[in-house]
Amino acid sequence: MKLNTKNLIVIFGILGLCMLAAFPISVLAFQSSQPKPDPQATVQAMVTQTVIALTFNAPTQTPPPPTPTVVPVTQTTAPTATTVPATAASYCDWVAFVKDVTVPDGTTFAPGETFTKT
């Protein structure tokens, strides 16, 4: 038999086809030799891990609420207005209090009463 290009292509084609056929067979053989996981053991491991996680993350008993303490009301004096010399004024110092429009200082309200201060 004389080897020419046509014969070489046929030989290499047959070898390639054999290799391609052997690859899936070897993959299936390796998969069947591996042990199958036990479903009952898998479920038992999941339950055990869940119980451990719930035990570590269990809520703790909340402490009792603190007892209220009465703070005496102290009278403070109202701040007095001070003037700043014009030479020391900067852009941040241009704001000045003009007057109370709606609620004057010292007005008392009932607990829970709403008001608007302008």
Image: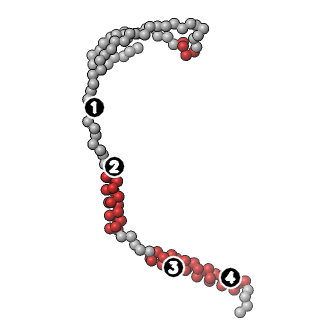
Tell me: residue 86, above or below residue 52: above
Which residue position is annotated with label 4? 9
**Quadrant assignment, res 39:** bottom left
| Residue at the (51%, 75%) spot, across then down | 27
- Label 1 and label 3: CA atoms lie apart by 74 Å
Q: Amino acid at mark 3?
A: Ile
Q: Secondary structure at mark 2?
A: loop
Residue closer to the observer: 93 or 3: 93
Q: Position of residue 100 (x, y in %)?
A: 41, 9
Q: Is residue 65 visible?
A: yes
Q: Quadrant of the C terminus?
A: top left
Which residue position is annotated with label 2? 57
Which residue position is annotated with label 1? 66
Indicate which disc residue 25 carries: 3
- Label 1 and label 4: CA atoms lie apart by 92 Å
Q: Quadrant of the N terminus?
A: bottom right
Residue closer to the observer: 16 or 67: 67
Q: Amino acid at mark 1?
A: Pro
- Label 4 and label 2: CA atoms lie apart by 69 Å
Q: Nearer the viewer, mark 1 or mark 2?
A: 1
Q: Is residue 103 visible?
A: no
